[in-house]
Amino acid sequence: MSDPNKDAISAEKEALKLKLPPIVYPPENLYAVTPEQRKLLKYRRSKEQQKTINELVIDKAKINLDRTLRKRVPPLPEPDYPSTMTSDLKKKGLNYNYMKRCVESSPIVPIQQEWLDHMLMLIPEHLKEGKKREELLGSLISEVSGDFEKSMKRCLVQSVLVKPPVKWLEDEGGPLPESPVGLDYSNPWHSSYVQARNQILSNLHIVHPTMKMLLDIGYTTFTDTVVLDFTGIRAKGPIDCETLKNDLTIQAKKAEEKIMNTWYPRVINLFTKKEALEGIKPEKLDAFYSCVSTLMSNQIKDILRRTVEGFVKLFDPKDQQRLPIFKMELTFDDDKMEFYPTFQDLEDIILGLVERIAEVLQNVQTIPSWLSGISTPVNLDTELPEHVLQWALTTLKAAVQQNLDGARKHYETYVEKYNWLLDGTADKMIEAFQAEDHTFDEYTEFIERFFSLASEIMLLPQWVHYPMVRLDCEDLKTGLTNKAKAFANMLLNDIASKYRKENECICSEFEAIREHALKIPETTEEMMDLIAYIEKARTVRIQELALRIQESKRQMSYFLDTFLFPQEDLTLNANVLLWPKKINPIFDENDELIENAKRKKENELVAKREKLILEVEKESRHMDEFTEFAELERMQQYVTDVRQLQKRIQESEEAVQFINKEEELFKWELTKYPELDNLKNNIEPYHKFFNLVLKWQRAEKRWMDGGFLDLNGESMEADVDEFSREIFKTLKFFQMKHKKELQEKRKALRKRSVTEERPEEEPKENPTIIMCATIMEQIKVFKECIPTVSILCNPGMRARHWKQMSEIVGYDLTPDSGTTLRKVLKLNLAPYLDKFEVISAGASK
């Protein structure tokens, strides 16, 4: 027969080889007071306190009553007693009223605020709404407090005094309630006690020896054990929240494996022994295993609860020595200042660790399930109570928020100081500044504000340490610094653009001076303008440009410290600084150019003066030829020659104006040309005469050879008279002119005859006068034709009138389209004009 002890040892060893689910320790608060019990205890304690207060008030009222009786009290007004009342009752009533008043005057403990709060909670919420809510609630509280005080006084009076049997004494509210007296609560209890004890022993499996062994295993395993070890987390220094999550997750997994490899095999080994179920009836077996499952569940829940409590305590703001230190960053992305990870992410990870702890040891099989080996195992109920999880999450959330206050306030400091760089305020400031007209110094002052701000931001600490957070601000500092520098560079680019335009303008003005200085003047006026321009450039513009270059140098010294010029700007800046030295050789070259141009223009002016003199002499000779013109048939040629000569005289006048202008520019004495004025005056009569003659010739031809019926005697006579007057005036003018010339020649001849003896020449006939006389004669002859035209060209003449005149001369006189005045004159109608005039007069009527 085998040894039972050896069999038990071998069975225990085999059980230890198995990897079994863990066992739950009984919770520490197994005998702790529940929230419901706390409420009951609190209510009982408040009742006891109120009872004590009432006793103290009664004692004090008795003392006050005793003191008052020893003093002199004014008498009370006597009531209207019944006539039958005895003096003894009357005295008792008076004393009762007096002592009642004394008792009521003693101090009363007011109603507790907690009671009032509970009363207000009973009021429905919709009745607490409205404008007069505060007033109504105050009135209600006053009414309740008054009723409470009255009730307390009444209670005090009824407790202290005994009312005498006097009918006229009133006591509102009736007598006080009395405790029950004479009730018998005795009952024989021993038999029922024994019965109850036996029933408990038959159903209370917790007192079974196996349960004690199971409890001992649990205490041995779980007393100093937690799922997660939180010691040393702070000593690790700053850590990523994800890293902490992974570390604790791995630690929880290892702890679960350890418990399932140590505690659970021992529990299984305990129930594989025969004595484990000793004394358990078959019908009570399920209840027994249910008790085992409950004990194991409580042990597991206890270790999970303690782990959760330890994790919650880890974040206690009042005990910061164990707080983990999380790495957090203030980031700058898309012009936004943000936390990484965000507060919400950090909070979610921390709260998620509670849920991860709650997931540990959730797959522990019940003993019957393991022993039976069923395919679908039944697990213990090891889930943490909802109120524990809710408490942990709520407490953790509040603790995390409180521990993050420092980081949040640091972020708010950044927002308060530097958010204007990001919310568009800085952009509006710069736009408004650029829209206004500011000096370079005002620009630099405004730019320095942004550079100073960038320096201020860079000097801020990179790391800021808080109890639960090590805040890295480097990314935010870099982003804000770059933002401030970007605004500064925007303004720098603006004034750099203006600086570039100013330098280009300076170089352009120097280029314009050089271009003007080296340009060869084509005319004397251009030369004089160039001289004045260069003189002004030397005395005024160069000085102004020198001041502008000096300012450009001052601005350049600022840009060299703050701005990176491109190569083309560096070349432009160098050209600006070199122009003052480059311009002097250009002025020297201009002096030489002006000297040569001046010499050349003076020579050209002298040549033009000589040429003009020759031209005037030539025109004078041509003018003398006009006195010889005497052929009326060439009158058209004469007019053309006069016009050409007038044009040449006009050109000579323009040449005189140009020469005089040049002389003024050279400051020479102005030359005069009186011969040209004489030519202009002498040619005008010839021009008028030749044109008048040509006009007469054309009018005569039109009248003589034009349509006969188109002639008008009256207008013809007026035109002929006008021609006659003008020719007569011209004739008189040339006769007087000829006479004057003859007198001057005679004077000249007389002067010559004094020194030389020459015969006096006979004066020749003036061809112009001859032509005038000829024209006068032609006009006189033409005037004789006017009566014929006036008679025959009457607009009232009709065919019968022409027929009458035709009968007078003996042939047909009716004019047709080919009839001209010349043909009519050849008919020699002068003898018949008197008769024709009579007919014409009749036609007019």
Image (spheres, rainbow, N blue to C red):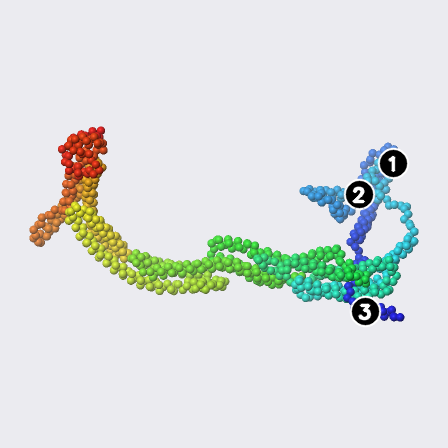
Kind of residue at badge 1: Ser
Task: Establish if 688 lies above or below 498.
Answer: above
**Residue 637 badge:** none
Q: CA distance from mark 3 to mark 2?
A: 77 Å
- Element at label 1: helix
Residue 491 seen = yes
172 to the left or right of 350: right
Tell me which label, 3 or 1, sits earlier in the chain: 3
Mark 1 lies on residue: 87
Q: Nearer the viewer, mark 1 or mark 2?
A: 2
- Element at label 3: helix
Q: Nearer the viewer, mark 3 or mark 2?
A: 3
Q: Residues within 10 Å of mark 1 (few under 14, many from 20)?
A: few
Which percent across, then down, holds residue 292?
82, 60
Of residue 261 and residue 397, the one placed in the foreground of this image is 261
Residue shown at 47%/56% (left/top)?
439
Mark 3 lies on residue: 13
Q: Quadrant of residue 75?
A: top right
211 to the left or right of 358: right
Which percent across, then down, holds residue 281?
87, 59
Kind of residue at badge 3: Lys
Kind of residue at badge 2: Ser
Tell me which label, 3 or 2, sits earlier in the chain: 3
Tell me which label, 1 or 2, sits earlier in the chain: 1
**Residue 151 badge:** 2
- Element at label 2: helix
